[in-house]
Each structure stands twice: as C-alpha cells, then as structure tokens.
Image (spheres, grey):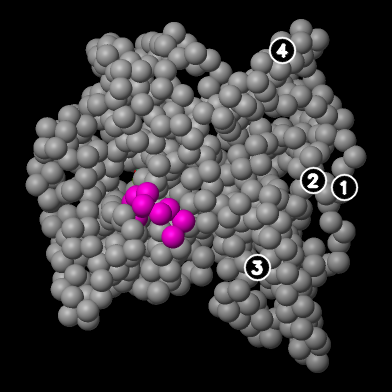
Amino acid sequence: MEILKGIPVSPGLFIGEAFVLEGEEARIPERFVLSELVEGEVARFEKALAAVREEMAALADRVRAETGEGVAGILVFAISVLDDPKLSGEIISHIRRDRNTAEFAASRVLRGRARILKNIPHTLLSQRASDIMDLERRLLRALLGAKRETLSHLDRPVVVVAHDLGPAQTVSMDHGKVRAFALDVGGKTSHTAILARAYRIPAVVGLGTISTDVCGGDTIIVDGTRGIVVVRPDEKTLARYRKLDAEQTDFSVLIRRERGMPAVTKDGAAVRVMANIEFPEEVQTAIEYGAEGIGLFRTEFLYLRSGILPSEWDHFETYRKSLSMLGDRPLVIRTLDLGADKMLPAQERHERNPVLGLRSIRLSMKYPEPFRTQVRAVVRASALGRVKMLLPMVSNMDELRWARSVAAEIMQDLDREGMAFDRNLDVGIMIEIPAAAVHVESFAKLSDFFSIGTNDLIQYALAVDRTDEVLAGLYTPAHPSILKLIKTAIEGARRKSKPVAMCGEMAGDILFTIPLLGMGLAEFSVAPAVIGDVKRIIRSVKLSDCKEVAEAALAMDESSEVLGLLRSMLRKLVPGGDRLGESG
Ligand code: PEP
Ligand code: MG
C-alpha cells in the first residue's frame, strides 16, 4: 500500500481500477518538405485545423447540453485560439518560409505560445498553457491520423492516472466510466480541475510521479476532498473508505438540495454568497449553484482568447450577455489584472520581480488606452443591470483617484453622445496589498466598496510566492497576522459604512467561514461548487458563536493552533461539518 498526498481539486471519493494514460508529449522531429510540396503541406495543415475546430465545436455542444454554458466556455477559449488568424498565419509561414512539415510547424508555434503563458506569474493565465498543449495534441493527432485514445470506449469504471490531462481530453472521456483523476501535475485553477468539478469527478493533482508509480489495473482510492490517493490499499483501508463513501453520498444530495436557500444565520443575520467566474458562460452555472450574483468577474480571458486587445464591443457584449442571465443580481467586473509584460506588446521591459512590478492598475495607468476601452464598456453596461467596477492591486489613493477620473471623463463623453449609463456606478477596490488593508478608512473616502483578495494579500503579507508549490506549506490564511489584517480591513470599511466582501480563495475555504462571519464579513464570493457548503455553515451557526471563535483565533500565536481550533469548531457548530467540502 502506498499513500500519496497531492492537491485536492475536485471533491469526492472513488475506489476503483487504475487506467494509466500514456503521455503524448513526444517531440516531433524537425523535418523539411520539398519546395514543390509546400502548398500541399499548407493544405494538409488547413484541413487538420478545420477538423480539430469541428471536433472542438461538437465537444462544446455536447458539454453545453450536459453541464450548461459555464464549462462549454472553456472549450470556447480553445476554439477562439484555433480561430486566431495570427496563429494559423504563423504556422503557415513556418511551412512556407522554413519548409517545415505541418506537424513540426504546428507543434513549434503552439508549444511556443504555451511556454509564454506558463511563464506568466499568475496561476489563472499560466494554467491556459495546458489548454494550448491539448490543442497541439489534437492537431497532431489529426495530422498523423492517429487513433483516439481508448478512453472514450471504456467498458468498466476506472480512475484515470496520467501525467497531465488537457481540457478537451477531459470532456471527451466517457464520464459514466471515468470516475476519478490522479495526475502528476496541475493546480487548483487549471481548466481540467474546473471540468472535473463540473462533472463531479473526484480529482487529485500535483502527485509528482503517480503516472509512473501505478500500473494499469492496480486498485486505487482517490480522495478528492483531502487530496489523498491510496495505491494498492490493504483490506482495512479499503473497508474504511467504503464506509466513508456510503455516508458521503447521502450527505452530498442534502447539500445540493439546500444550496438555493438563503444564507441567514440562526440568529437572523443575512449574508450574501456570490460566485467568482472567469468566463461569461459560467454565469448560468453560478446561478444554478445558488449564487446571489457575481462577486468577482475576472476579465483577463478577454485578453487571452485572441492574444490581442479586446475592443469596446468585445467587452460590452461580454457584460451584456452576463447581465441578461443575471437579471437583477449584481455583477462585479474587475478591470484588467495582468501582471506580465508578454500580454501587452507595448511593454517589453524585463522585470526582476514581476509580482512586485508593473501589474494590474499600475499597468493600466502606464498604458491607459486598454483600460479606458474597458471602463467605457463597463459604464455603458451599467445601463443594463446592477454593475459594479472593481479595481485590482490598488496600493495608494492616487491610483484610485486616477481610475475614478477616467470613469468620470467617460461618463461626460457618454452624456455628450446621449448614451445611457448609471451615473451612480459603484467603483471599488480590491484589498490585496497589506497597505490597502491597514489604510482602508482613507480609501473609503474614494471607494464605494471593497473586496478582499486574500490570494494576493497572503502572498504579500507573508512574503510567499502563491504559485510556488515548494513554499506551499508557508502560504496559509490561518496565520494570525492574516486574520488581523482581514479584521482591520472589515472593521475599517464598516466604520465608514462601506460594503466589504471577500473574493479570494479563503472565502470559499470552509474552515474560515465561521471566523470570517465573526469578524463581520457579510459577503462571500466563492467558486460556484462550494456555495452549498458555505451556505450550510452560515445557516447552522449563530453570529455570537462566530464572534467568539474569531476572537479566540485572533488571540493565538500560531497557524497550527488556529487550524486546530477552526477544525474543532466546524465539527462542533455545524451538523456534518467534518464532511463539508465534499459535496461538489
Ligand atoms: C486575490 O488576489 O485574492 C484575487 C481574488 O485575485 P486573483 O486571484 O485573480 O489574483
Ligand atoms: Mg489578486
């Protein structure tokens, strides 16, 4: 028996047989074509591209029918990459100019793009690299005429064990038979992880070398809630997990039934539970999962789909579509939050510390045109629904003042043009730099609301790179200093009567729901899949108990003590608290 610890990315439990997927990462050798065959090679590439595009569109239709718009949006990103004329132009130019084979040219260009994305110090963007690698695999398969993996024709339930999985590979599997994933690499925000959650397939990633440690046919337990994989379990372990599995099934059904209910504590405090999304197509899923609105719409995808700057129309259409699904639920649109020089061609400077560099609002101030375009679309969209504009990475009043002045100028322009908009559009800032957390009362003079971004706040407060798996043990919301920063921010905002939400991952970490409620947080914006769990906790507790837990945690010296306290309080105060986080 071997017990492996990885990153839990999709909750649930499955016990079954391993199906080890062979890697398809083999390099394509550089081969050349004769000049008279070059045009034939171009035609071969174009045919393969059209075939893959058709395949992806059919997959997107299938996924849309099975899980709704949200997940299909991920494939829409892949299709938009295929449709990008710059991409095909570059591949064709390698075939024509360098006489490369279609396989080599396609592989070279797509791997180049994947490499650029991978190097961006932002997990969400870097995860897109695996989407691109998946397209490479598909194109090569179309060009080489290789057979599809047997994964779509399984005759028994299996756990898929692989080095990595692309999103398109994930959706084309037989979901009746593929019941869990265990992967060597990956992160919480990878699209494969998002898909696994949407299909409710338990998944653990970041397991290192599981794809070479396990043999096809081995019995394997995947505990996607705790991030544990047991390979070749002994009888005692098997019996324990089988019991857990039976109990969990009943509990998940209960949580799903409850997630549409309002989030009100036992002593009557109403809390708002919203969703974080990255694609407009996810709005529908978020509503189905019980979201009361979108608390964080990350708009970076607009810049990534095509690799070019989106137009005002691109922005506006995206927001219009989202608002039409939301009705009168709020939509908090965050402006451009890119941190890398690669994304905007104008910025070619090498940065020694990109995470501390010219990113987010700083980038917008240096290159204001893309920001102005986005703000104009946001302001126009405010005529169509409850829109709020959220500014990322604000560290001083000047940045906020500048952004507000841009919005005010745009409103004047729109007035002159006779366009409709909401004159009282709320403009707020993310609290993701410790300076902003302690300075919140001053920011309240110019900010209509706040949203605490703990993903970055923790990284800056503890000086730990949030993307470095080697430092993962140091990166924790349970550090008492983090709790203090959050409390300072919440209390400061409340003193100035400004709404304050939390949209970092901590808001969806069920261990922290109770202390956050106790510190006065009344709006949580979380991944759609955990809305049911967070609501159950809110509905099970009294605010007065939460305050006591928060005070006790704040008085502690160490993260380990805080975690111990929070685990025991969750078990004590919430029926089924020890099983939450598993309902998906
Ligand atoms: C955060 O920093 O907490 C946040 C929500 O922003 P992102 O994860 O997009 O950096
Ligand atoms: Mg952030």
| Label 2 CB less than 8 angstroms from ligand 1 | no
Which element type, helix, strand or loop, lies under badge 1?
A: helix
- Choose the circle earlier in sequence order: 2 or 4: 2
Q: Kindly identify which residue carries mark 4.
A: 243
Name the amino acid type tagged 2: Asp
Task: Identify which residue is drawn at 77% across, 78% down.
Answer: 47
Quadrant of the rendered structure where residue 441 is?
top left
Residue 391 visible in the snapshot: yes
Q: Are marks 4 and 3 in contact (CB under 8 Å)?
A: no
Provide residue 271's location: percent of width, then percent of height: 33, 31
Q: Kindly identify which residue carries mark 3.
A: 108
Magenta stretch bounds: 324-333
Q: Which mark is residue 312?
A: none
Quote the CA–CA distance across marks 2 and 4. 26 Å
Quote the CA–CA distance across marks 2 and 1. 7 Å
Q: Is 173 inside the magenta-drawn segment?
A: no
Q: Are marks 2 and 1 in contact (CB under 8 Å)?
A: yes
Quadrant of the rendered structure where residue 333 is?
bottom left
- Choose the circle earlier in sequence order: 2 or 3: 3
